[in-house]
Image: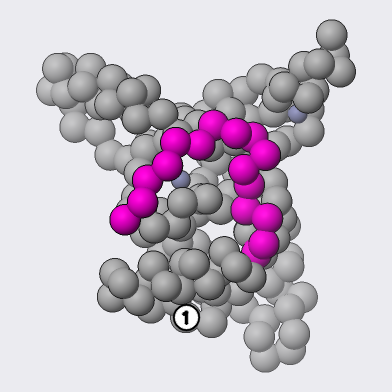
Amino acid sequence: MSRHTCTDPKHHVHDAAGFVGAVERACQERGLRLTPIRARVLGFIADAGKPLKAYDLLEQVRVGEGAGAAAPPTVYRALDFLLANGFIHKLQSVNSFVACHHPSTTQHSVPFLICDRCHSAVELEDKHVVDLLDERARVLGFVPQAQTLEVHGLCGDCAAKAA
Ligand SMILES: [Zn+2]
Ligand SMILES: [Zn+2]
């Protein structure tokens, strides 16, 4: 299982089909089932290239081809599966979902850098930040679950434009 350190904002999920394929393989390895609706929801999120709002996702699935259309509860169950297994992340502060670019790892804590201007989100893969937070919480007797840390601001491009 490969882990890489990736803080390069250009490192996004470029190819939605390839990403869904990678998740499919990860599911096989972990004995999970990527049902058609789960794969479709994942495909929409990967295809968006930036955080996809929950209501936009529901709309995309709803207008999907005839019999393929799914009701919100079905979509939410698919999202729960994808979240629980670490294939996507939820950004609470912007009520959006984003594909995880290292789907071979299980559910993990991760800081996200969210640009308030262009609405991009970069997954900052820094184990030290996560470990430190975990350690400090445990000192207080707190048992943290996998968390998404959301840091708002301006990305490099937008900051440069604003300067
Ligand atoms: Zn991730
Ligand atoms: Zn930006």
Residue 56, image quadrant: bottom right
* Amino acid type assigned to the residue bearing label 1 in the image: Thr
Task: Confirm whether residue 117 shows in the render.
Answer: yes
Position of residue 41 relative to residue 37, above or below, is above
Give coordinates of residue 12: x percent, y percent: 63, 47
In-front residue for pair 16/74: 16
Locate the C terminus and report the quarter of the image it occupies. Answer: top right
Position of residue 95 relative to residue 126, above or below, is below
Give coordinates of residue 125: x percent, y percent: 45, 34
- Residue beneath disc 1: 35
Question: Is residue 73 toward the left or the right of residue 31 in the image?
Answer: right
Residue 65, image quadrant: bottom right
- Taking the magenta stretch, the answer to whether it contains residue 12 is yes
In-front residue for pair 58/153: 153
The residue range painted magenta reads: 1-16
Q: Residue at x 37, y 38 (%)?
A: 109
Give coordinates of residue 151: x percent, y percent: 55, 24
